[in-house]
Image (cartoon, rainbow, N blue to C red):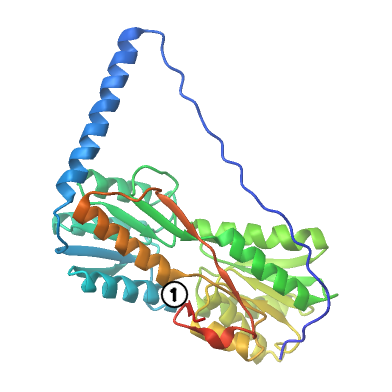
């Protein structure tokens, strides 16, 4: 069982600054007129596309393109999307790109060739997926993203993500309390092409670093349990005095727990996860994991499907493209109320 200590974590205010660029206009009146005309044409084209997309009734095929359904988190995403689409009268196809942009492009091409009505996408990298989303949009197929962002706006109809910064701060505060006077820890980092990995790590450190903790080592384990275990085994050998582990997701944290257990070091080591999958929740309830952070992937996916249906049936796009949903800290006190990425009242 993990021992909790009396140390109270300091809360570090976090914020992100957004830079807005202004495009200078030429003083040449003909340039201004041509720019205005182009803008008007673009707006008219977008309006025509929305009108054409709005059939007034649901139906047809929707492509669901995810990362890896063998991971419980992405399985919940797929299962929710397929169920919600089916209930509304849509057929769905499911493919997994495994964070491979080339595979993602192949699935986007297939969706376009098959005449898909829309795409639900969990993208393969923030920068790497811009072209794929643009390709679908240019083909008149609206894209609704779930779980992860791309690095440009104005292409997808929606980008629905968990508030990773807020969730990571909650998790870090619980982990700090568990660590007490122990300062040495290691980190398991997610997939480097996924914005979520960087955001969670940064937010962990914004809470942890000002308090004097000592990160002995950081290893990338690409969201994977087996890879997390392997990297943890190496870090246990290299850093025998470690007392804590922060992980970018539950699968890596669960791999770390396996390695620590086999090495006889789980007792007294504080492990933090992120996602809220059922195995992690069970580990929290058993005292093997300090906490996990529940990502509301089920609710986020339901929202994406509802917005997709609204767009296809009425031509109404979401009021905001980027949409953030707050995460929930899962501790032994509420772990018994979590199942399938959903917290019951």
Which residue is labeled 1 in the image?
A: 73
Q: Nearer the viewer, residue 56 or 25?
A: 56
Is 50 rendered above or below residue 41?
below
The quadrant where residue 51 appears:
top left
Q: Position of residue 303 (x, y in %)?
A: 37, 63
The quadrant where residue 155 appears:
top left
Residue plotted at (79% across, 63% down)? 10
Q: Position of residue 176 (x, y in %)?
A: 75, 71
Query: Which quadrant, please, contains the N terminus?
Result: bottom right
Q: Position of residue 8 (x, y in %)?
A: 81, 71
Task: Report whether residue 336 is seen.
Answer: yes
Residue plotted at (25% across, 53% down)? 311
Q: Position of residue 100 (x, y in %)?
A: 37, 61
Is 15 rendered above or below residue 21?
below
11 lies left or right of 94: right
Q: Residue lying farthest front?
A: 345
Is 282 rendered above or below residue 227?
below
Question: How crowded is the residue under tag 1: few (<14 C-alpha within 10 Å), some, or many (20+)?
Answer: many
What is the total number of numbered labels drawn onto the structure image?
1
Q: Name the element at disc 1.
A: helix
Q: Nearer the viewer, residue 275 or 301?
A: 301
112 lies left or right of 126: left
37 lies left or right of 145: left
Residue plotted at (57% across, 57% down)? 198
Is 84 rendered above or below residue 209?
below
């Amino acid at each position: 069982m993990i021992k909790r200590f009396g140390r109270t974590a300091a809360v570090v205010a976090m914020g992100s600054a957004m830079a807005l660029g202004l495009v200078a206009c030429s003083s040449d009146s003909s340039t201004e007129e041509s720019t205005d005309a182009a803008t008007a044409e673009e707006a008219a084209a977008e309006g025509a596309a929305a009108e054409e997309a709005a059939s007034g009734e649901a139906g047809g095929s929707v492509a669901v393109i995810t990362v890896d359904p063998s991971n419980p988190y992405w399985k919940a995403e797929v299962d929710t999307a397929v169920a919600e689409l089916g209930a509304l009268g849509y057929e769905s196809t499911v493919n997994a790109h495994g964070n491979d942009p080339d595979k993602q492009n192949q699935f986007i091409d297939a969706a376009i060739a098959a005449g898909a009505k829309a795409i639900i996408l969990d993208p393969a990298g923030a920068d790497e997926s811009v072209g794929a989303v643009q390709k679908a949009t240019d083909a008149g197929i609206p894209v609704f993203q779930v779980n992860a962002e791309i690095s440009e706006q104005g292409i997808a109809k929606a980008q629905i993500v968990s508030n990773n910064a807020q969730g990571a701060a909650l998790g870090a505060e619980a982990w700090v309390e568990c660590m007490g006077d122990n300062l040495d820890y290691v980190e398991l980092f997610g997939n480097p092409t996924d914005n979520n990995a960087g955001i969670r790590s940064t937010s962990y450190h914004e809470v942890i670093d000002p308090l004097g903790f000592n990160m002995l080592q950081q290893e990338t384990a690409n969201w994977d349990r087996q890879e997390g275990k392997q990297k943890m085994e190496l870090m246990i050998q290299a850093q025998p005095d470690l007392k804590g582990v922060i992980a970018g997701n539950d699968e890596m944290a669960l791999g770390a727990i396996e390695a620590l257990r086999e090495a006889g070091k789980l007792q007294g080591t504080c492990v933090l996860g992120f996602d809220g999958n059922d195995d992690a929740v069970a580990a929290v309830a058993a005292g093997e994991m300090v906490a996990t952070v529940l990502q509301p992937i089920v609710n986020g996916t339901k929202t994406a499907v509802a917005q997709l249906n609204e767009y296809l049936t009425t031509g109404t796009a979401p009021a905001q493209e980027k949409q953030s949903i707050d995460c929930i800290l899962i501790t032994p006190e509420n772990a018994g109320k979590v199942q399938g990425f959903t917290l019951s009242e």
